[in-house]
């Protein structure tokens, strides 16, 4: 769970800050490759709004919505009728981390966070992908398609929505 939350937070903040974007929206495919080269793939849609708002809607292999706002993460898992609410462990400013990303190639940038290296590939002004090794040495790559940035987004989109009969776990 910790790895999952870190992935979401870092990724949201990386593309949101690189070019001082105020909003970002895209379809994504997230691939996680373990040490045995086994690959798990997830796909969905993300909407993010500066400073700390994001909604990751996972579609495959399971439906799940992940809301991030004001240092709290809410994970809504309709297939198991469960909601997990977690307070983020710190109020560290991820935007500052990424604003210090260094250009190392034509469309390649590198950012560092907690001893991890994040490679960011741009296509024009848009983030194309983000790659890094997670805390378990898995290779994580998130590829974005149909990107939009700096457009108006209604903040109510980031308010978690779930049926009251779901089990709620506060961590």
Image: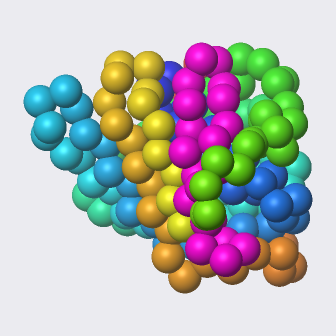
Q: Does 61 sit left or right of 37 as displayed?
A: right
Residue in front for this viewpoint, 157 or 2: 2
Q: Is residue 58 above or below residue 36?
A: below
Quadrant containing the C terminus is top right
Asked if residue 56 shows in the view, the reply is no
Is residue 40 placed above or below 86 in the rendered structure? below
First to last magenta residue range: 108-127
Residue at the image point whose x is 34% and y is 37% from the top: 139
Horizontal and vertical percent position of residue 53: 77, 52
**Which quarter of the figure is the N terminus placed in?**
top left
Above or below for 30 versus 151: above
Question: In the depicted view, which residue is nearer to us: 135 or 99?
Answer: 99
Residue 5 sits in which quadrant? top right
Q: Quadrant of residue 22?
A: bottom right
- Magenta span main SS: strand
Q: Is residue 121 magenta?
A: yes
Would residue 110 be found to the left or right of residue 57 on screen?
A: right
What residue is drawn where x is 54% and y is 67%? 128
Question: Does residue 86 appear in the picture of this structure?
Answer: yes
Does residue 128 belong to the magenta stretch? no
Q: Position of residue 123 (x, y in %)?
A: 60, 74
Q: Estimate the x, y position of residue 26 in percent, counting from the top left.
A: 58, 72
Report whether 142 appears left or right of 61.
right
Q: Residue at x 39, y 42 (%)?
A: 140
């Amino acid at each position: 769970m910790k790895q999952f939350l870190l992935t979401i937070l870092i990724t949201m903040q990386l593309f949101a800050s690189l070019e001082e974007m105020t909003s970002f929206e895209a379809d994504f495919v997230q691939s996680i490759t373990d040490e045995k080269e086994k690959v798990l793939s997830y796909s969905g849609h993300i909407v993010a709004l500066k400073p700390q708002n994001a909604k990751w809607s996972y579609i495959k292999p399971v439906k799940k919505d992940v809301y991030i706002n004001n240092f709290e993460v809410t994970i809504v898992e309709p297939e198991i009728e469960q909601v997990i609410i977690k307070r983020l462990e710190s109020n560290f400013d991820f935007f500052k981390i990424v604003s210090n990303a260094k250009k190392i190639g034509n469309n390649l940038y590198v950012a560092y966070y907690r001893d991890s290296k994040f490679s960011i590939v741009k296509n024009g002004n848009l983030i194309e992908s983000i790659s890094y090794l997670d805390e378990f040495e898995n290779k994580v790559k998130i590829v974005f398609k149909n990107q939009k940035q700096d457009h108006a987004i209604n903040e109510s989109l980031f308010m978690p929505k779930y049926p009251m009969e779901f089990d709620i776990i506060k961590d």
